[in-house]
Amino acid sequence: MRLRPVDQAGFTLLEIMVVVMLMGLLTAVLVSQGNWTSDDRQLEEEAARLEDTLALLNERSLFSGQLLALRLQTTGWTPLAYDRIEGDFLPVDDTALKAHRLPPSLELVWELDDLGEDQARLSDVAETLVQDDVMAGTGEGLLDGEEGDESDQDDEVFPQVFFFPSGEVSPLTLTLRAYDDVEAEQRLRVSALGQFSDPDAENDEENEP
């Protein structure tokens, strides 16, 4: 008995192209979702790291009686301690307070809170202390406006945030955000007494009826 051949149906070129296009779209969606999740997680982790650094600097200043500071950059931050012998702010000798660089996808911006004379007093005290030591010949630290090696000017910017042994802290609002998504951000407000708060949460409470 002779067997009849079985017809074999295959995919057409058009069907294959449609499947490939659908797979490409699905891959693009998954990749974009993965990037969003990664940025969101990084924001939370970096915001927590920054808050821990601020709290630790404030605590250490209180217990050690030393003037501490934080130099801010869009790419990260550097904890500093004022050295009266050198007459300058130097990196803190503590692994828990080492300089930190943000992931390339994130940036840090800040705004010093305007508290009138109180705000000016904190900055003036720190600058006057450094200026007095430099004038007395105890060090050669650079202040804003002084000439120095152009290659080192970015590293010699005077710190923006100060932590005094009295418990006072330069009040400011810090914002960590993603370059690719301006709505993805974490904000932190620091009061003159070293207390932390979420300015967005405060605004929501004020707007509630």
Image (spheres, rainbow, N blue to C red):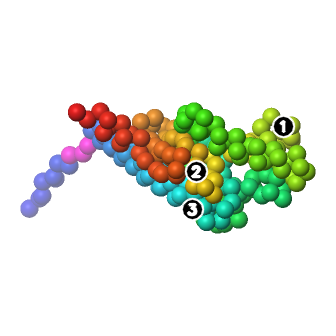
Q: Residues within 10 Å of mark 1 (few under 14, many from 20)?
A: few
Q: Residues within 10 Å of mark 3 (few under 14, many from 20)?
A: some
Contact? badges 3 and 2 (CB < 8 Å): no
Where's residue 24, x and y in %? 37, 41
Q: Is residue 23 left or right of residue 138?
A: left
Which quadrant of the structure image shows residue 201?
A: top left
Residue 13, quarter of picture:
top left
Identify the residue position indicated by label 1 in the image.
Answer: 146
In the image, what residue type sits under mark 3?
Glu
Q: Residue furthest left?
A: 1
Which disc number belongs to residue 40? none
The residue that appears at 54% across and 46% down in the rendered structure is 192
Query: Where is residue 189 drawn, in percent x and y?
Result: 48, 44
Going from N to C along the chain, the mark reached first, 2 or 1, is 1
Q: Residue 59 got which mark?
A: 3
Name which residue type carries label 2: Glu
Q: Which badge, 1 or 3, is on the more N-terminal residue?
A: 3
Q: Which residues are magenta?
A: 9-13
> Is 118 on the left or on the right of 12, as rendered?
right
Question: Relative to the observer, which residue lies in front, 29 or 94?
Answer: 94
Magenta residue check for 114: no
Instruction: Say few, some or many: other residues with alpha carbon within 10 Å of mark 2 (under 14 / 14 to 19 / 20 or more).
Output: some
Question: Is 17 rendered above or below residue 55?
Answer: above
- Label 3 vs label 2, nearer the camera: 2
Question: Residue sitting at 66 percent across and 62 percent down?
Answer: 65
Q: Which mark is residue 168?
A: 2
Q: Secondary structure at mark 1?
A: loop
Position of residue 19 measured from the top left corner of the image (x, y, whole percent): 30, 41
